[in-house]
Image (cartoon, rainbow, N blue to C red):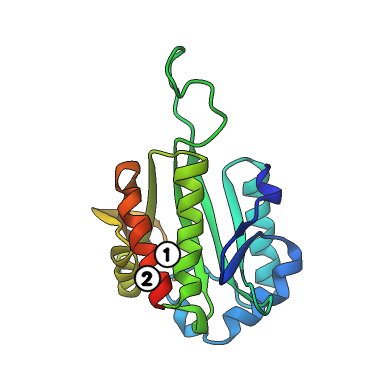
């Protein structure tokens, strides 16, 4: 299944392929509380949201990202967005079991943001569960990486809560939402850790 048709379905949320039909929903989701996105590149207003979708689709078409809209199952409301990106395909030698795979060996989950009502809810937890399940069980990646602005304490705590392991701080790593060279905290989950992380995510989702 191509990334343009990949849907990840849960009890609380659907992760739908991001498209221009989601622009109005993204605008409404962000407008509830723009102060939440001090450290995140979140589009504000219809023009920025359309440009945001254009960029995500260009990355998808280039094979470097798989972007989603996060949608509530019961209402169809757009809650935010997320994506797989930095898709890595390693140069396995001929004869190796992973040689010739047209699937990522590692990836990053990022560009994740949610409207206020979805933060620290089952919807938020389930979105991560759906993506990590796809990465580790369908793509069979060896690692999933996350980066967050070192100043973003809420995001750092959320990644630790789901079982991400902190690997350190990358200095002047990326352009921040406030247009400085930000320090990024790097977290990862590797394949051997996935069963325990999956158990934890299911528990958190069911308790939310």
Q: Splitting the image into 4 quarters, where does residue 1 fall?
A: top right
Residue 180 location (% of width, % of height) = 39, 65
Residue 45 location (% of width, % of height) = 66, 78
Q: Residues within 10 Å of mark 2 (few under 14, many from 20)?
A: some
In this rendering, would 185 be left or right of 92? left
Q: Could you say whether the residue bearing mark 1 is in a helix, strand or loop?
A: loop
**Cα–Cα gap, marks 2 and 1:** 30 Å
Residue 178 location (% of width, % of height) = 44, 71
Quadrant of the snapshot with the C terminus: bottom left
Query: Which residue is label 2 attached to?
Result: 204
Q: Residues within 10 Å of mark 1 (few under 14, many from 20)?
A: some
Q: Residue at x 53, y 21 (%)?
A: 100
Closest to the observer, 24 or 171: 24
Closest to the observer, 153 or 104: 104
Q: Residue at x 66, y 70 (%)?
A: 49
**Mark 2 vs 1, N-terminal side:** 1
Closest to the observer, 83 or 203: 203
In the image, is residue 21 above or below residue 96? below
Can residue 182 be seen from the camera position used here? no
Residue 79 location (% of width, % of height) = 59, 75
In the image, is residue 92 above or below residue 186? above
The label nearer to you, 2 versus 1, is: 2
Q: For the view shown, which residue lies furthest in the top direction?
A: 95
In this rendering, would 197 be left or right of 115? left
Query: Which residue is label 1 attached to?
Result: 176
Q: Splitting the image into 4 quarters, where does residue 198 fall?
A: bottom left
Q: Could you say whether the residue bearing mark 2 is in a helix, strand or loop?
A: helix
């Amino acid at each position: 299944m191509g990334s343009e048709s990949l849907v990840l379905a849960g009890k609380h949320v659907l992760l739908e392929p991001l498209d221009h039909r989601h622009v109005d929903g993204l605008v409404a989701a962000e407008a509830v509380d723009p102060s939440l996105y001090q450290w995140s590149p979140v589009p504000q207003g219809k023009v920025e949201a359309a440009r945001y979708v254009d960029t995500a689709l260009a990355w998808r078409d280039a094979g470097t990202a798989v972007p989603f809209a996060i949608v509530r199952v019961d209402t169809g409301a757009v809650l935010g967005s997320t994506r797989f990106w930095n898709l890595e395909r390693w140069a396995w030698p001929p004869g190796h079991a992973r040689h010739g795979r047209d699937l990522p060996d590692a990836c990053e989950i990022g560009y994740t943001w949610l409207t206020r009502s979805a933060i620290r809810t089952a919807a938020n937890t389930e979105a991560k569960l759906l993506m990590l399940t796809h990465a580790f069980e369908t793509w069979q990646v060896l690692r999933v990486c996350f980066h967050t602005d070192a100043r973003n304490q809420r995001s750092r705590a959320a990644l630790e809560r789901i079982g991400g392991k902190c690997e350190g701080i990358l200095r002047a790593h990326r352009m921040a939402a406030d247009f400085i060279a930000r320090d990024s905290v790097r977290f990862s989950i590797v394949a051997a850790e996935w069963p325990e992380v999956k158990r934890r995510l299911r528990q958190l989702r069911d308790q939310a």
